[in-house]
Amino acid sequence: MDKHEELLIRTNTASFKDSNGMAMGFDGDQFLILIVGFICSLFLMTALTMMGYSIITAFVTCLFPTALTYIYLKVFLAHKPPHYQSDLLQDWIHGFVYERSLLQKENPYYSVMVREIVRKKIEENKKEAII
């Protein structure tokens, strides 16, 4: 890299027509999920302090909903293609959908086709070696 390229500031551009925007590093409205997780944490902290728990215990306990929400967003939603989460869940439950079925027999002509392709490649390599 040129030293001038290192000094360039690179930013993500989001065209209006093909983007839902970006906020807090998340595409579209995904940041709202994190805000809802944070609000749930605040309610949980308030409830725990009203029930008599110490403020430290309530604070540490309330970090979990926000942290789990953030991890969920980063792993399953942020910068992923549409329907990534449901496709991944379907793969975990049913296995990889697009693989060849165990009941489907192998193409009987496959080995013949492979042999022909390999034979043609060998002949081409021999011709190139002669030239």
Image (cartoon, rainbow, N blue to C red):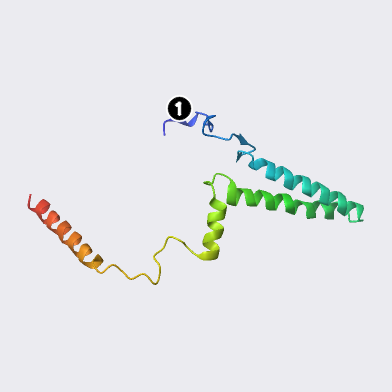
In this view, the residue in front, 37 or 49, is: 37
Front residue of 121/104: it is 104
Q: Name the residue under label 1.
A: 4
86 left or right, relative to 97: right
Query: Relative to residue 17, is residue 53 depicted above or below?
Result: below
Left or right, 10 with respect to 44, comes to: left
The residue positioned 59% from the left and 51% from the top of the image is 75
Residue at position x 66%, y 41% in the image: 31
- In this rendering, position of residue 7 left or right of residue 129: right
Q: In which quarter of the image is residue 105?
A: bottom left
Q: Is mark 1 on a helix, strand or loop?
A: helix
Residue 40 horizontal/vertical position (percent): 78, 48
Looking at this view, name the residue that lies furthest to the front. Answer: 104
**Residue 84 in the image, given as x and y percentages of width and height:** 54, 51
Vertical placement of 70 versus 5: above or below?
Answer: below
Viewport quadrant of the N terminus:
top left
Instruction: Using the image as rendered, state which of residue 68 and residue 98 is in the foreground.
Output: 98
Query: x, y percentage for residue 7?
Result: 50, 29
Residue 38, how many percent across, how many down? 75, 45
Give the residue type that dot 1 points to. His
Q: Residue furthest left?
A: 130
**Position of 32 compared to 41: left or right?**
left
Looking at the image, which residue is at 11% across and 56% down?
A: 126
Question: In which quadrant of the rendered view does residue 86 lie?
Answer: bottom right
Near mark 1 (Cα within 10 A), the count class, few <14, some 14-19 or many ≥20, is few
